[in-house]
């Protein structure tokens, strides 16, 4: 379904957000336009000099007024045009890789923003649940205080906890709005999309733990393509040191000159011929400097490509270790900690309302249980963000 056809402009899945982003993001549009720019450069690769046409009239041959015209064409050595065309092809290929690189970057940012928004919404739901518990506790504490079953400290403590949760909800609501605006910028939103993410889930990925996976990263491919472009520029600069060519044609009158049959030439008698020449670069210091510059650019591009590869491999290793660490932490929460949380909260609530425990024990049990839930959500979000970064590093 096209983004503009989506009912009520609601985006409820990551796939829908990426679809809109790829279609509308300005950076991707610029990268796409750059391919067309380089295509035009390919058409301009064979750039032949302007044809020179000259005419001459007057007494250049005798006291008679003669008329002459001449056509001259200067061209580079044909090798220059072939090398320029090859350079244009390399630049087109570089722009195509840059488009893929830009798409990969935007997709990563959309994924990260979407999962962050989902995490914040889920945290908001947990805070609302905590607020309901404390509101219920405040109601019970108020009744106990009014019946003189407890002191004012218990009621005041309950009110403080409720106000703290209300403040946390206010701050979290602002964070959610900020994250929504981040998504709107990435999607170049002009229609007012409403984001409704589903539950936060663990993002799945095939993790081989092989740094060779980074060779698929378009950033690395783009860096390596700069080597090819620099080498192509060097070949163009070398070809420009070859002799230039010149071909010409002249046609003129020579009034009063003797003709081949012994007569006298008039203005209607024409004398014509052709000329050929070469332009030898006797002073080639500038051209040599261009070749050396292209060589240096190729060397710099090679170093940059190697540096990018080292950085990507380092990121891959670091993210792999982080993912393994977070996986172990998630396993602890999912198999050991979380299954007990609901039971503890439910028992604490009933025990307090029945007078079996005081408010200090109640808060201690509830807060510890909810803290486990908050830590689990944070760990799950950190895990997903690490997976998203890993996908970006390997070019997915």
Image: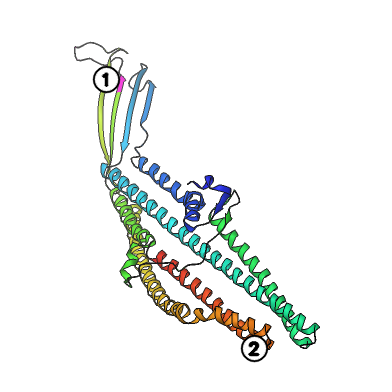
Which residue in the structure is indicated by mark 2?
361
Q: Where is residue 211 in the image (x, y as percent from the top left)?
A: 33, 71
> Which residue sits at x=26%, y=40%?
278
Number of disc labels:
2
Q: In this view, does 352 lie to the left or right of 318?
A: right
Q: Which residue shows up at 46% across the image and 72% down it?
A: 383
Query: As drawn, which residue projects farthest toward the front?
Result: 354
Q: Which colour scheme is used?
A: rainbow
Disc sitting over residue 164 in the figure = none
Q: Is residue 198 above or below residue 339?
A: above
- Counting from the top left corner in percent of width and height, residue 100 is at 40, 55
Say which quadrant the C terminus sits in: bottom left
Answer above or below: position of 144 versus 267: below
Q: Where is residue 168 in the image (x, y as percent from the top left)?
A: 66, 73
Secondary structure mostly taken by the magenta-highlighted segment of the chain? loop
Element type where label 2 sits in the image: helix
Q: In front of the other: label 2 or label 1?
A: 2
Q: Is residue 361 above or below residue 190?
A: below
Q: Considering the numbered disc 1 on the image, is that residue within a helix, a strand or a loop? A: strand
Q: Is the residue marked by circle 2 packed among few (<14), some (14-19), or many (20+) residues within 10 Å?
A: some
Q: Is residue 253 magenta?
A: yes
Q: Is residue 188 visible?
A: no
121 on left or right of 74: right
Distance of label 2 from label 1 (alpha carbons): 118 Å
Q: Residue at x 73, y 77 (%)?
A: 139
* Extent of the magenta region: 251-261
Which numbered disc flags the more N-terminal residue, 2 or 1? 1
Q: Is residue 122 a member of the stretch shown in magenta?
A: no
Q: Name the residue under label 1.
A: 271
The spot of residue 308 in percent (x, y) is: 38, 67
């Amino acid at each position: 379904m096209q983004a503009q056809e989506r009912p009520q402009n609601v985006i409820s899945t990551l796939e829908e957000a990426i679809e809109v982003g790829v279609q509308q993001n300005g950076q991707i549009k610029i990268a796409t336009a750059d391919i067309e720019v380089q295509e035009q450069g390919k058409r301009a690769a064979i750039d032949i000099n302007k044809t020179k046409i000259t005419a001459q009239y007057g007494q250049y041959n005798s006291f008679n007024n003669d008329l002459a015209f001449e056509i001259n064409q200067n061209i580079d050595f044909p090798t220059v045009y072939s090398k320029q065309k090859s350079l244009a092809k390399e630049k087109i290929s570089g722009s195509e890789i840059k488009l893929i690189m830009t798409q990969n970057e935007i997709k990563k940012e959309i994924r990260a923003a979407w999962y962050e928004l989902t995490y914040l919404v889920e945290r908001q739901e947990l805070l609302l649940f905590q607020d309901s518990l404390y509101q219920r506790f405040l109601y019970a504490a108020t009744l106990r205080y009014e019946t003189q079953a407890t002191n004012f400290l218990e009621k005041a403590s309950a009110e403080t906890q409720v106000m703290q949760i209300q403040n946390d909800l206010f701050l979290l609501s602002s964070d959610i709005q900020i994250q929504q605006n981040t998504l709107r910028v990435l999607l170049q939103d002009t229609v007012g999309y409403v984001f409704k993410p589903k539950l936060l889930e663990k993002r799945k990925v095939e993790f081989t733990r092989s740094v060779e996976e980074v060779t698929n990263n378009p950033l690395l491919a783009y860096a390596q393509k700069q080597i090819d472009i620099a080498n192509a520029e060097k070949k163009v600069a070398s070809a420009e040191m070859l002799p230039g060519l010149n071909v010409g044609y002249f046609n003129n009158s020579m009034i009063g000159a003797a003709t081949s049959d012994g007569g006298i030439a008039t203005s209607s008698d024409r004398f014509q011929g052709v000329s050929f020449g070469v332009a030898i670069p006797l002073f080639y210091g500038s051209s040599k400097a261009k070749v050396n510059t292209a060589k240096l650019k190729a060397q710099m591009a090679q170093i940059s490509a190697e540096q990018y590869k080292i950085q990507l491999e380092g990121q891959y290793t670091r993210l792999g270790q982080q993912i393994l660490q977070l996986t172990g932490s998630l396993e602890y929460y999912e198999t050991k900690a979380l299954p007990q949380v609901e039971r503890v909260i439910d028992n604490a609530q009933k025990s307090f309302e029945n007078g079996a425990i005081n408010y200090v024990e109640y808060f201690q049990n509830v807060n510890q249980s909810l803290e486990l839930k908050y830590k689990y959500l944070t760990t799950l979000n950190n895990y997903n963000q690490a997976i998203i970064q890993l996908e970006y590093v390997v070019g997915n």
